[in-house]
Amino acid sequence: MKDSRILSDFKENGYLHVKGFYSLDLISKIKNSLVQEVKKNLRNIPGADKKFSGGKVEFIAQAQKHLSSDFNNLFNIDSLNDLVDFLLEESASLFTSEVLFKRAETGFGYRPHQDAVYFCSKENRGLNTWTPLEASGLGNGGIWYIPGSHLLGELPHKAHNFNDFSCDLKSLTMKGLEKLLPEAAAGDLLIHDCLMVHGSAPNKSQNRRIAISRFYLPKSNLADSGKLVLNKKRSLLVNGDFKKVE
Ligand SMILES: O=C(O)CCC(=O)C(=O)O
């Protein structure tokens, strides 16, 4: 995977779609482990409880602290770590991970945003590895990108619903850039730059859709304490405290 063309494509387009990156055996282990996580660790996340409805989980934000090391370790594979370091061009650390459940028929969508606004680092360098645990695409609220939008820099956002920890772009004028919605299979890996404009539609299909989003930052962006050096003015997440944008 450490090919200079992959790096230049990533820099130019702001995303990478690696088909069949994970073995289906690993995806199945991750899914099984997730069921245990939900039962054991994820029920009491502050602010996320309301997302549990009818005993079903819809969405859990900022679940990293609550995920067991056994679960996180499933992703601690050399090929993934090496690829992340290669694309960021330095050694990186996992900053946060999210479990993105979209219920069948009613699972909501994500309005257009850049992850850098949530997980802002000093230099807006970072990337998100997005792993669908089941097929994801046009039919079930798959993630979409606007390739090249990362080159526009950080765009103005507004708070959408503070309690939901979400904000979105003030406007979506992308100067001729076009939306791309990858059809991804379980086992694929999608990676996007922290400045990539992206989002997703609601899941109106008959099946749930689960993806794991893991956000990495270059180690040089981490403070000595291991906590992120953040621009507090525009951050939503400051060392575990949620702040309002604007
Ligand atoms: O999982 C999705 O549908 C979109 C997730 C997303 O926007 C994100 O991880 O930043």
Image: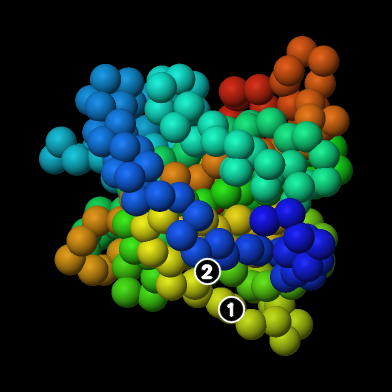
Residue drawn at the location 57% of the way across and 64% of the way down? 17
Pointer 2: what residue? 144
Location of residue 95 by image quarter:
top right
Task: Please identify the quadrant where the C terminus is shown.
Answer: top right
Query: Please, what is the three-letter code of the amino acid marked with disc 2?
Result: Trp
- Seen in the image, is 88 located left or right of residue 244? right
Furthest residue in direction top, as rendered: 225
How many other residues sit within 10 Å of disc 2, few (<14), some (14-19) or many (≥20)?
many
In the foreground, 67 or 112? 67
* Number of marks in the rendered image: 2
Element type at mark 2: strand
Pointer 1: what residue? 179
How many other residues sit within 10 Å of disc 1, few (<14), some (14-19) or many (≥20)?
some
Q: Is residue 41 above or below residue 14?
A: above
- Seen in the image, is 192 located left or right of residue 70? right
Residue drawn at the location 47% of the way across and 39% of the way down? 98
In the foreground, 237 or 72? 72
Query: Please, what is the three-letter code of the amino acid marked with disc 1?
Result: Lys
Q: State whether residue 116 appears in this view.
A: no
Q: Is residue 234 above or below residue 47?
A: below
Furthest residue in direction left, as rendered: 54
User: Residue 194's x, y, as percent?
Assistant: 70, 52
Residue drawn at the location 72% of the way across and 86% of the way down? 176
Element type at mark 1: loop
Is mark 2 in CB contact (under 8 Å) with mark 1? yes
User: Residue 109's x, y, as percent?
Assistant: 41, 61
Residue drawn at the location 41% of the way across and 55% of the way down? 187
